[in-house]
Amino acid sequence: MKQLKLWMLAAILTCGSLLTSCTSDDTPVGPSPEDKVEAQLQKMTLREKVGQLFFIRPEALDTTIHWKEYADLMPLELQAVNNCMKDVNEKYPVGGIILYAWNIKDEAQLAQFLPQLKALNGQPLMCIDEEGGRVARIANNDNFHVKKYESMASIGATGNPKNAYECGNTIGTYLNHYGFDIDFAPVADVNTNPENIVIGPRAFSDDPAVAAPMVTNYLQGLKDAGITGCIKHFPGHGDTKADTHYGYAQTQKTWAEMLNCEIVTFRAGIQWGCQLIMTAHISAPNVIGEDIPSTMPSVILQDKLRRELGYQNIIVTDAMDMGAITQQYTVDKAAVGCIQAGADIVLCPKDFVEAFEAVLTAVENGTITESRLNQSVRRILRLKFSAD
C-alpha cells in the first residue's frame, strides 16, 4: 500500500510538470514577446542600442555625399547599397531607413535595393512616406502601376470612413508586397488654416469630427495589410502658414484650443492603438511657454503626449534635416535634445555620424541615462518583433 501511494504521488507530480511545460495540444510554451525584447536588449552593446534610435536616409551612410538642399539629393539617385555605405554601417548600425522618390526607380530596382538595406547592421525597418495624393513616392512614379488617389481631402469629403480604410489597405497591400514595414501616414492634422501651404489636402478635413474616423480607418487598413502606420504631425500642423521643411512655422493656439480641434484626431489614433506618432517642428509658444519647435520640449512630448494623453508607444521626430531644426540647432544638440525631450526615433539627422556620436557621448557621460536609452530601444524592439 505504501508503494502504491508513492507511485501515485510520483504520477501526480509528473503530470503537474507536464502541464506547466506544455499546452493542451503538447505545444511547448515559448518566451513571451516582452521576454524576447528583454533578452535582445541584454545582448546589445551600447553602440547597437544607440543605432536603433536612428532612422535615416540611405545617403546618410555614404559619407562621400555632402548636400545643402533637398534638391542636391535628387540627381544622385542613390538606389543601391555601395561599399562606403557598408563600411560606415559596420561602425554605425541603424534602426530604420526611409526611402524617398529619388531612391526608387522601378520594381526591379526596388526588389534588389530593399533586401540590401535590410541586411545592414542594425536590422533596419524599411520606411516610406506613402500617404496617397501628392505625397506618394511609389504611386507618383510612372514605373509603378498602383492605384493613385487625388488627395486625403477628397476622401474626407465623401464622409465615409470606409473609403479611408480602402485607401490605407490598398497602399498597405502594395507596400507590404514590395517589402516595406512602416508607412509614415496618415496625416492626422486638421487643416483649419486655408493659407496652409504644407498640409492642405494632405489632411482629411478641416473638421476634427470628420478627420478622426478617417485617420483610424486608414490606420486599420494599413494594419490589415501588414503595414504599421504613423499619425503625424503632433501636436498639429494644420493651423500654420509656413513650411517647416524650409524654416520657422508657428501656431498661436493654446492647449485648450488644441484639445477641441487638433488633438481630437490624435486622441482617436491613440485610443485605436497607433504604434507611431510623428512630431511637428512647429512652434506653439502658448503651449510650450517658449518659441521653439515642438520636437524639442518635454512639455509637448512628455507632459502632453505621454502623461495627459496616455500615449506609450513610439515617438518619432519629423525629419531633423528640415530647416525649422537646422536653422536653430546644431546636429549634435538637435539629436541629444529631442531624445531628452522624449523622442524615441531621430529621423533623418543632417549628419548621421555626428548625431550618432553625440548621442553615444551623451549616454557615456550621463547626459542621457542608459535607462532612458533603454526605454526607447524597448519600444523599437517591440515593434520589430511584432513585424517579424
Image (tube, rainbow, N blue to C red):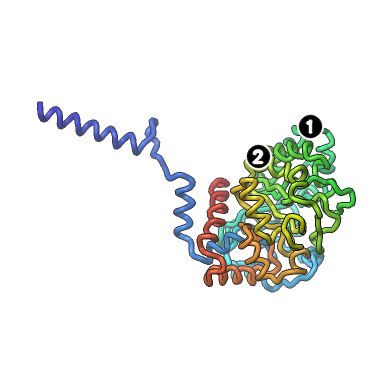
Badge 2 or badge 1: first in the primary sequence: 1
Residue 93 horizontal/vertical position (percent): 57, 64
Residue 172 horizontal/vertical position (percent): 69, 42
The N terminus lies in quadrant: top left
Q: Nearer the viewer, residue 313 or 108?
A: 313
Asked if marks 2 and 1 touch (Cβ < 8 Å), the reply is no
27 to the left or right of 371:
left
243 to the left or right of 88:
right
Decide: is 74 above or below 386.
Answer: below
Residue type, numbered disc 1? Asn
Tell me the number on the disc at residue 225: 2
Decide: is 160 above or below 124.
Answer: above
Task: Identify which residue is drawn at 45% across, 59% down.
Answer: 43
Task: Identify which residue is drawn at 54% across, 60% down.
Answer: 372
Tell me the number on the disc at residue 160: 1
Residue 50 horizontal/vertical position (percent): 56, 64
The residues bearing labels 2 and 1 have C-alpha atoms spaced at a distance of 20 Å
Q: Nearer the viewer, residue 280 or 3?
A: 280
Residue type, numbered disc 2? Ala
Task: Identify which residue is drawn at 70% across, 71% down.
Answer: 330
Q: Nearer the viewer, residue 263 or 112?
A: 263
314 to the left or right of 188:
left
Residue 48 horizontal/vertical position (percent): 53, 63
Instruction: Identify the element where label 1 is drawn.
Output: loop
